[in-house]
Image (tube, rainbow, N blue to C red):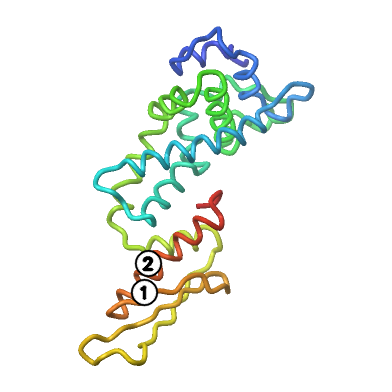
């Protein structure tokens, strides 16, 4: 049996008498025909989520590299992380599902839980504003953020790039490193080119092969973030 939406709002620390139609839609799967469902709110919630997590990362002291920031954010906005947050919030029993999804265990499906959680973010943003949406995420997603930080801070850009490429393209980045002509013997300079999925993505120069490769990996992570922010 579906629990009242108001119960979930109280658990989330939100007024139970404000924005009830939007919050009901945020918990309604498309299989519940004839009712507004969560897909448009999910789209908004996804954007709010990425902005809030990006602001957390930007304000962090000491600062993380852009590559490490990309990795932390990717983990925070993943279906797995959002589904865990939804379980902590007890979203499943409050979902409004069609008969087919009820029979197939839709209340426990990570993809549905993650989508509903994002839709709830969108609803909080619309009903209560951006500050309250950030507070909502601070309560229910900060654990995922904190768990991702230590590992990201220990990894170099080349490792971060490899993980991103493996996750998105199921392949590995490739590097070509060569010495540049004209540099004095006591100050050699190397150029590294990194290719991802058959496309040359970034180049960088450095005083050693390792330094050039590291700088190229960092530039590639930045390029991927600009090119495909929804997957970074």
Residue 79, placed above or below residue 24: below
The CA distance from mark 2 to mark 1 is 8 Å
Disc 1 element? helix
Residue drawn 38% across and 29% down? 138
**CB contact under 8 Å: marks 2 and 1:** yes
Horizontal side of residue 24 vs 82, given as left or right: right
Q: Residues within 10 Å of mark 1 (few under 14, many from 20)?
A: many
Residue drawn 68% across and 28% down? 29
Q: Residue 108 lies in what quarter of the image?
A: top right
Which residue carries the number 1 mark?
A: 213
Residue 149, position as x, y percentages in the image? 32, 46
Residue 11, position as x, y percentages in the image? 45, 15
Q: Residue furthest right?
A: 34
Disc 2 element? helix
Q: Residue furthest top?
A: 17
Residue 122, placed above or below residue 73: above
Residue 158, position as x, y percentages in the image? 37, 67
Q: Quadrant of the N terminus?
A: top right
Residue 196, placed above or below residue 33: below
Which residue carries the number 2 mark?
A: 158
Residue 19, placed above or below residue 119: above
Front: mark 2 or 1: 1
Q: Residues within 10 Å of mark 2 (few under 14, many from 20)?
A: many
């Amino acid at each position: 049996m579906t629990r009242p939406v108001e119960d979930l709002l109280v658990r989330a620390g939100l007024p139970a008498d404000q924005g009830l139609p939007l919050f009901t839609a945020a918990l309604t799967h498309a299989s519940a025909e004839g009712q507004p469902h969560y897909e448009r709110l999910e789209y908004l919630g996804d954007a709010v989520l990425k902005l809030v997590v990006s602001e957390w990362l930007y304000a962090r002291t000491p600062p993380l590299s852009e590559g490490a920031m990309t990795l932390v954010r990717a983990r925070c906005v993943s279906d797995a992380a959002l589904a865990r947050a939804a379980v902590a919030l007890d979203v499943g029993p409050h979902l409004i599902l069609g008969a087919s999804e009820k029979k197939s265990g839709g209340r426990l499906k990570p993809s549905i839980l993650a989508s509903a959680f994002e839709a709830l973010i969108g609803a909080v943003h619309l009903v209560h504003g951006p500050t309250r949406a950030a507070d909502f995420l601070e309560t229910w997603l900060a654990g995922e953020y904190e768990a991702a930080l230590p590992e990201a801070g220990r990894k170099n850009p080349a490792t971060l790039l490899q993980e991103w490429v493996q996750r998105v393209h199921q392949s590995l980045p490739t590097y070509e490193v060569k010495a540049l002509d004209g540099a004095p013997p006591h100050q050699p300079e190397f150029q590294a080119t990194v290719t991802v999925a058959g496309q040359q993505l970034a180049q960088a120069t450095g005083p050693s092969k390792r330094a050039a490769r590291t700088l190229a990996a960092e530039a590639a992570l930045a390029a991927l973030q600009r090119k495909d922010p929804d997957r970074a």
